[in-house]
Image: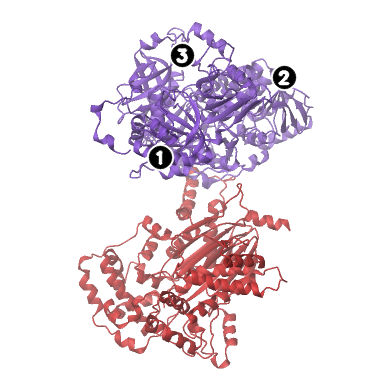
Chain colours: A red, B purple
Amino acid sequence: MSISALLSMGRCCCRCCCPRGLWMLSAPCCDDRRMCVCPGPRRIGIPVRSSSLPLFSDAMPAPTQLFFPLIRNCELSRIYGTACYCHHKHLCCSSPYVPQSRLRYTPHPAYATFCRPKENWWQYTQGRRYASTPQKFYLTPPQVNSILKANEYSFKVPEFDGKNVSSILGFDSNQLPANAPIEDRRSAATCLQTRGMLLGVFDGHAGCACSQAVSERLFYYIAVSLLPHETLLEIENAVESGRALLPILQWHKHPNDYFSKEASKLYFNSLRTYWQELIDLNTGESTDIDVKEALINAFKRLDNDISLEAQVGDPNSFLNYLVLRVAFSGATACVAHVDGVDLHVANTGDSRAMLGVQEEDGSWSAVTLSNDHNAQNERELERLKLEHPKSEAKSVVKQDRLLGLLMPFRAFGDVKFKWSIDLQKRVIESGPDQLNDNEYTKFIPPNYHTPPYLTAEPEVTYHRLRPQDKFLVLATDGLWETMHRQDVVRIVGEYLTGMHHQQPIAVGGYKVTLGQMHGLLTERRTKMSSVFEDQNAATHLIRHAVGNNEFGTVDHERLSKMLSLPEELARMYRDDITIIVVQFNSHVVGAYQNQE
Amino acid sequence: MMFYRLLSIVGRQRASPGWQNWSSARNSASAAEAHSMALPTQAQVVICGGGIMGTSVAYHLSKMGWKDIVLLEQGRLAAGSTRFCAGILSTARHLTIEQKMADYSNKLYHQLEQETGIQTGYTRTGSIFLAQTQDRLISLKRINSRLNVIGIPSEIISPKKVAELHHLLNVHDLVGAMHVPEDAVVSSADVALALASAASQNGVQIYDRTSVLHVMVKKGQVTGVETDKGQIECQYFVNCAGQWAYELGLSNEEPVSIPLHACEHFYLLTRPLETPLQSSTPTIVDADGRIYIRNWQGGILSGGFEKNPKPIFTEGKNQLEIQNLQEDWDHFEPLLSSLLRRMPELETLEIMKLVNCPETFTPDMRCIMGESPAVQGYFVLAGMNSAGLSFGGGAGKYLAEWMVHGYPSENVWELDLKRFGALQSSRTFLRHRVMEVMPLMYDLKVPRWDFQTGRQLRTSPLYDRLDAQGARWMEKHGFERPKYFVPPDKDLLALEQSKTFYKPDWFDIVESEVKCCKEAVCVIDMSSFTKFEITSTGDQALEVLQYLFSNDLDVPVGHIVHTGMLNEGGGYENDCSIARLNKRSFFMISPTDQQVHCWAWLKKHMPKDSNLLLEDVTWKYTALNLIGPRAVDVLSELSYAPMTPDHFPSLFCKEMSVGYANGIRVMSMTHTGEPGFMLYIPIEYALHVYNEVMSVGQKYGIRNAGYYALRSLRIEKFFAFWGQDINNLTTPLECGRESRVKLEKGMDFIGRDALLLQKQNGVYKRLTMFILDDHDTDLDLWPWWGEPIYRNGQYVGKTTSSAYSYSLERHVCLGFVHNFSEDTGEEQVVTADFINRGEYEIDIAGYRFQAKAKLYPVASLFTQKRRKDDMELSDLHGK
């Protein structure tokens, strides 16, 4: 459904809306926003770039004209936002087809009766609009920048003796929330006991608990899987005798990227069990560790641990609730491991890794290093059908969703798609009340006959870096659904090289006046000026993803409007966006190549 | 013969500049290769580099009578930066020595055509420096007053007058300008060829297409050069290799560090205007717009110094690359905009070419000349910061004098290679620093500017500690020194906003530090000082020091002596304090930037005696200055030893314990004239001693202070500093330090004869202290240094440093007073009477302020006693 369609329905939808207070009465599950997988999609598919939004055109439909004056008035906007939030839930309740929400859940019919409009929302807001005059509202460029840059992070691989010997120059990362709180996570770390660097983006659904846990834990599982036997022994011995441990990972974190202190001990114990098993499994024969295998094992093991921890529970009630939240929510993961010229990408779900390649003529081309695990991927459809009996062939993927509900076909967590019905019921019953009260967790997917339907096993691709491979973009689907991969690579490529790799101008024999040259240069500079606003490639990409107009250039007005959407509305227009741009060191990569 | 072949190339090139008929030049060059001659096997001097610097040195050396000179050029003569140079000769420089070099160059080039018969394209166009802001105008006015006193005509003019002088200029946004009518344009390649031709006629042998591979050195002395065409034995080698000088310096077995780095530099050439510009059209420098514009063959030539320079050749490349550099129009865009704003009518003018000609820059924007501290006979002249043409003549002359006489006729310390050490020669440092230096060419030069790049290289162990307490830093010789400490509740302006010629924003902060130094006690980290130890098995150390230093060093153990290290002319090569640690070892403290120079001087003059050991211990000690009347209390509490003057007289040095730390060298001296102590602390104890001092000092009101407070204190007490106030052309007698010279100490010392003569004849200049009378600190321009001094309306000299004295509540300037004869302009003897009987004025950017001259410091500053009834409650407050 396009936004215009949505908006044309605006007026009638509003009629069936109710203020927040009423909704809260009817839906206690919404108390906990994190766990709340509200009855109805949080994401309405808006092909943002495909049409110019009527929202931003001069001829605004009546309800949308309200959006902007209202924001100025904080209190009012909250009311409005809430109302609108509900309104879309209802919209979705009544709409059978919602294309892009990752997880869809049709509520118990009872809800519909609860949600009957008690009061006409239109009048409700009208009544409070007396103070606001229809004025245009814009964020100033500095305000826009402060929003865009709030989560940006850059890491430069330190130079030794004026030289960087790593194949990575550094990376830029950033994220822009649409959900509140954001459900995406990102991680980056250098492996200290082996060579190489790990980078990953994680897109959570049904809350951020799972993506948070995966972002904290996955790299440890990978690093441990990569460790040689002796190192594992050394670490285990150190734990056993209470000595200081070898550090495994050097994290590169933005201050907002937090780790949960409470679960740290639990996580450590699970990890330790893993390496103990690795130690026991070692036969002392093979010394070469296969990165691909290590990545697969790590993914599967972590997902297994998440599942087990939820089944076993924890005496601490907070932790007990936490592990359940982690297990009942879900997350996709796209992780890159770079060691010298060896680049492995392990992907589970619909985030994507894209390599930026600079051709000899200076132009940019995109090489996809991961496959999306969703309905658009024929091989995934094939796999699912093979894994389940023929009788389920029609129900396993419905409306492009797993069991008609879940968009990604592979994910961490989401035990609703993995556990048997018995197990689910048992855990929920013995679980804390909050869990019991949550309609979503209690709800068993339809046509649930032969679990598991979902796996966290990643697809691993290998790429040997070449000097023309300049950078890697890891991003959640929030980016890829708004921008074409070719545009992404071109924008990052041009950003990273500045204008120097733009075709240089040469006068060479032509008659050019100073004035003409000046005009030409000014034009080129304006084109590039947006580049210089950002010190971070990921920020630059987000600026384009959110603010691009139909001509592919950043439109400040549009950017400003998109960023001033209240948090409840933002999710309608975009998904959380998380981006990591890794820049490669062509000199070092070239040197590797020459060695052979 | 060689020379005439070269001339034929010149002949072909002269009609049109080199870049136009590159191919024809190349043909003739390859023809030249065919009959290259064999190199001589030996010579007195080998000069490397056939640009304007090399040819100028050859020219001046041969004029001064040295004939046995070989000049080697790797490509063709005048082919590097010299060839591409924009050809502007400008005397408006910030340093007096640079003004003098440019002035000499101007006069030299003016008569060169007559002397050699080679056309140099010399045209006296004059130049106009535009000011878009009041601050820029102040800067120009300062230059203007200095130009005038050395006899270069110049004047400040109104925008209206600018429009009259140059009809294409848009003058609407200008507030004024400076006109220097005698500046010129000239073809630098032709100048170099003319100089080469004159040198050649004087016997200098010139070989092109000959590369110097490295310089051969034996026992720290140049013995010859290895070229791609064979060896030449020589006594002197001169490195004039321009942007390749750094690489060449490193190619030796004993590397010579010449810190410079090239940046790309762009300028634009156009076709002639419809009514071609006259060749006498003045050159325009619009520093606020970052551009220069000169007339060129009826059209214009315009380039500039952009904010975002492109450093080049960091990894060292061969010369061929310089000819294949790309034009970069996008990079030039800001300068082009600036040009069209300044001359809107040029819109329709047709472009001919954008030239990319790399220029060489140095870490402090001053050129590099002089002898290597490591290799005797290895001279350098390079790093011209894109003013090679302006400096070429003068710099060549000074270097030639230096080689022939052992020293140049002017003080060139500001340009001396020895101001740098190996620490400035990291490629990364140079690359980063020149990116800051190049834009600085046209940035406003304000007092107390600190470089922002290449910092935190050398630091004291207390750096982090002080930084956390709000220290703001300046850098000297790579060493971070605190300027002042910003209290937690105070905010200072951003870097760019704090640029001012008026009262700075830290005024109150420094005032409270100064007050604390005078009334309580302050700690200043002075670890940057150069520290040497001289030890011997017998009396050798004393003997050599007695010969090198003017004061009597045969003092009882534990005494400290202030003394100068003089040259033959009696001038200060170094001004230092020496403590006699025991009979056979001495501890010597010199200014920070003396580390290389003083070491080289001592090494050169000390006998090669294995029993005599000279060691640089700068890095071993952290120096803390406890300054103020309560310093004695703090120290005695920390050491449980009586520190009163009876037990610890002034200028005394003792090793003692401070806190837990033992072996701290405590010296009862300060560098400001306040009571106090210097603590020389082995670095591993530094943090401990500092912590102890601060915690014990609490009850005495201790606080941190920085160099700005120190500066205010020392200048108000007439303490001259080497490198700022005194230099190698200043004798002790000229700065009132007779007491530090023991002419009759029983043995000869360097400079004694000169001093004896001076004592007999009297001095020709005298360091004097000036207290500004009618100067409003809040509203008037602050003095800096280099301001002209007028006595009874006559120019008598320039200031060397200045500071605000918080006690006198006046500005104090130090400066030299000369006595120029009114008839002949000759220097005459300066007597105390002459100084005392004058009415003085100091010229700050064209405004003259009345000043009182003093030969001795104000006595009241030294008596610190406060009367009981002056005490206030606020004296009880912690500082």
- Residue A593 in which image quadrant: bottom right
> Is the C terminus of chain A in the top left, top right, bottom left or bottom right quadrant?
bottom right
Whole-angstrom CA distance, mark 2 to mark 3, is 38 Å
Residue at 28% across / 72% down in the picture?
A80
Which chain does tag 3 point to? B
- Which residue is labeled 1 in the image? B694
Task: Give the mark, 2 or 3, whose residue is nearer the N terminus.
Answer: 2
Q: Is residue A589 left or right of residue B336?
A: right
Mark 3 or mark 1, earlier in chain: 1
Residue indicated by mark 2: B68
Please name the residue shown 48% across and 68% down the image.
A264
Is B154 located above or below residue A452 in the figure?
above
User: Which quadrant: the N terminus of chain A?
Assistant: bottom left
Residue type highlighted by circle 1: Met
Subunit under mark 2: B
Label 3 SS: strand
Q: Residue furthest bottom?
A: A391
Label 1: which secondary element: helix
Q: Report which quarter residue A66 is drawn in.
A: bottom left
Q: Amino acid at mark 2?
A: Asp
What whole-number distance in Å separates the C-alpha atoms at marks 3 and 1?
A: 44 Å
Q: Nearer the viewer, mark 3 or mark 1?
A: 1
Q: Is residue B350 visible?
A: no
**Count of numbered circles on the image:** 3
Residue in the foreground of this view, choosing between A507 and B444: B444
In the image, residue A383 lies at what x, y percent? 59, 83
Q: Chain of mark 1?
A: B
